Amino acid sequence: MSLWHWLFRRRQSEKELDEEVQSHLRMAAQERMEQGETAEQARASSVREFGNVTLVKEVTRDMWGLRGLENLLQDLRYGLRAMLRNPGFTIVALLTLALGIGVNTAIFSVVNAVLIRPLPYRDPSRLMYISEFWPRERPVRSVPTPDFANWSEHDRLFDGLAAYGGGDEVNLTSAGEPERLLGAEVTWDFFPLLGVQPSLGRGFLREEDQPGGRQVVLLSHELWRRRFGSDPSVVGSSVNLDGAPHTIVGVIPAGFRFPDDEFKAELFLPMVVARAANWGSRDMRLIRPLARLKSGVTVDNVKAELSGLVQQSAGQEPPPFARMRAGMEVRVTPLHERLAAPARPILLVLLCSVGLLLIMSCVNVASLQLARGAARQKELAVRAALGAPRLRIAAQLLTESLVLAIAAAPIALLVGFTGLRVLQALAPPQIPHLESVHLDHTVLLFTLIVATLTGILFGLSPAILSSKVNLDDALKHSASRSTLGHPQHRIRSILVTAEIALAVVLLIGAGLLARTFIYLITVNPGFDPHHLLTLRISVSGNEYSKPEQQTAFFEQLLERVKALPAIQSADAGSGLPLLGWGSLRGTDVEGQPEAPPGLRPDVPCDAVGPGYFRTLRIPLLAGRAFSEKDRQGAPQVAIVNQAFARQFFPDQNVLGKHVRAGLRTGPWREIIGIVGSVRQLGLDHPESPAIYLPYLQEPDSSMDALVRAAGDPLNSVADVKAAVRAVDANQPVYDVATMDQRLSESIAPQRFNALLVGMFALLALGLGAIGIYGVLAYSVAQRTHEIGVRVALGARRADVLALVVGEGMRLVALGMGIGLPGALALTRLLRSLLFGVKPSDPVTLLAVSVGLLLVASLACYLPARRATKIDPMVALRYE
């Protein structure tokens, strides 16, 4: 019989088989009746001669070749009936499995979107990010335009070579209120390289990225919808960007992902690349190239050839630049790898955590299955006595487990959907594009596969052990006296021990991440973040093209802000604590030998106003702060922090020394003061050397304003914005936040890590406690007769309590003995996520051990307390 026939005409086939058997019987009976037998005798004789009708049907079905499917269908039906007959067991098992499978579904959906799924570009596997660097330095460099122009001529390596310069902020001063937007400059072939076509209008043309090209702009779909109301007629219209008119030539499709997660660009401008520029010329700039490798070209081929071209061009540069670029190498990184790298550590930790949680869920359900199998020993013995082979019984029990796991899958999807929403609400920016993650067909298939494997995992051991039936023992005992044999009891104990070991690993990992978070919130940031408002202002337009015009704007603004009644102090700087430095500059220190290329220290430099340190309340340790006199034309001065003085001038008087930051042709600056070190890169970064320059000598068009208020700083936002409008209504105010908010955002990744892994660890602890309680409760129930005998012979309440608790605590001690070494080995994978805490932190190990012992003691005490209340007279009559 074909599978199609069996699936859709099975009832008809059964009917035909029954009719054929009955036809044989009628024909045989008819022959006997013709020989003189009565009708009743003829029917009885024909049945005896024909044999066992049911057996004949079974043999016939076996000849159809689909007996396995028939058995499977029977087992599925029986499994569903068994679930309905035991609602308590079914509900507990379904919820336990749904929890384990659901959290795995949620985490996998993120892992799949960030680490596995190909990038949404044409043929993404051949897209590469290219950069230059000195081998002795860790930071990856961008690429100068001369090298980019040189590489673009070697098209035998690439099917396309484009570039972008990211993070360019522009002021949009038309089509409504002025707004500061993040833009990205891209070469004309940038979007064709990625295989992206504008949904409206056109892309850039080659002539538009050349000097003197047209002023055009492409809008992101989100900006087009939000700012322009999804009006298709905006293509061809003009908008003012930084005071200059630009023609909108197109709109990028919805959902476009910029190939650099540092930049959430809302508009795109053509990059002007002066390809004939040399090192040191005004037209030379650093850009970030993307390349599509030709088929058959390897990453090593590209690195070798491009490095050779770099050295060749370096030899043609003037001597200072040739020497500086000596030894520079090229790094070629697959684009997907570069984008996924920041999120990979925490996602892998979360994936491992939920994997352990799933194993614990399986262990718990397997333990329940073993207990249920013990109660079904008489049923299984009857089946075996009727001829069912052990393999057939094991297959039936395993099928029941699979039915249970598959039934948990829909609930797991609901748990996964909810968990994904929680992840999206809590996750830090380090997990890119999390808002677009959803449960797609890949995730649904993953859930189905995990559910199936889970059913096999937790069902295999109970199926094998429960199918091994001792007919004599099973049939002699009533169902109420069914007990676990030694193998089953030993397996349940092993399962509980494994649960405890896994819980220890998760608890220690969560404890280390929690200790990191606690350490960070107690770290002194080096300034007072309370009652401090921060906002960013970037002036643009022809009226601010000169440094003195930029300086005048910020001086007028600060005068107005300081005059507000609720403001204690205010100033501005080119960078904010916790958000990184304004710039890194190669630095020379007076009295120290000149560093060779690639070894010149890069020191963060920020330009700040005279009241910057007072507003932030950064202590002045020596010397003086900047004053209004430190302007252009005055002697060049600088202030360094304590970390700089300690590193470059150990045991020396720093005041009066000189430093040079930037080009070696730049001026030497006298150090006039030392201030306390600030954790500029975040609380999870150590204090680093820093140089502060007077803003009046180093003016900038973009500054961060700092406003210290007497009360809630958010109450001053409207007044500060009004002060900006009073100076120039065309200049937008953006990135407004209190410093307390920024402080909270800076530790968001550590908070997320500790919270999520901590939740998984608590679930694991709960599962472990339930496992201990289940084993001991079942043991007490099955040992009622034994405990009654002990009490009748004089055992005290404390003796019974110690007996049961001791049994449970032995399992806990063994689990901890296995889990602690395993945790010490596995938590080393967390090293990159820890700060101020070692993977072998003794405080965490002690706290986890004590906490686990307390929870395990409670789980052991409850069934032990029940055992102490057993009535000996009842126990001795127990059957």
Image (tube, grey):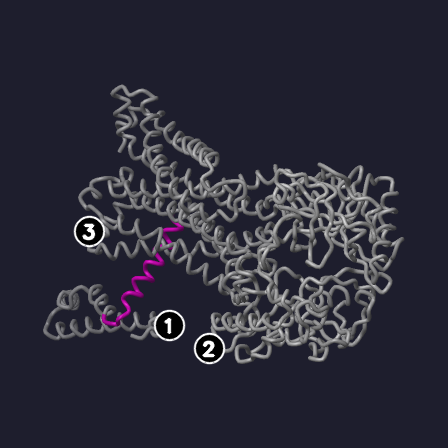
Q: Is residue 559 above or below residue 106?
A: above
Magenta span has 72? Answer: yes
Residue 863: horizontal and vertical position, in percent?
Answer: 38, 31
User: Which comes before the other along the chain, label 2 or label 3?
Assistant: 2
**SS at mark 3?**
helix
The residues bearing labels 1 and 3 have C-alpha atoms spaced at a distance of: 34 Å
| Residue position for label 1 | 8
Q: State left or right for residue 837 relative to residue 490.
A: right
**x, y (%) of residue 448?**
44, 60
Judging by the rendered image, the residue that carries numbered circle 2 is 296
Q: Earlier in the sequence, mark 1 or mark 3?
A: 1
- Which percent across, then down, holds residue 76? 35, 59
Question: How far is mark 2 from mark 1, CA to CA?
Answer: 51 Å
**Magenta span dominant secondary structure:** helix
Query: Image quadrant of residue 77?
Result: bottom left
Q: Mark 3 = which residue?
A: 385
Magenta residues span: 63-85
For badge 3, the amino acid type reads Ala
Q: Which residue is more in the foreground, 647 or 736?
A: 647
Which image quadrant: the N terminus?
A: bottom left
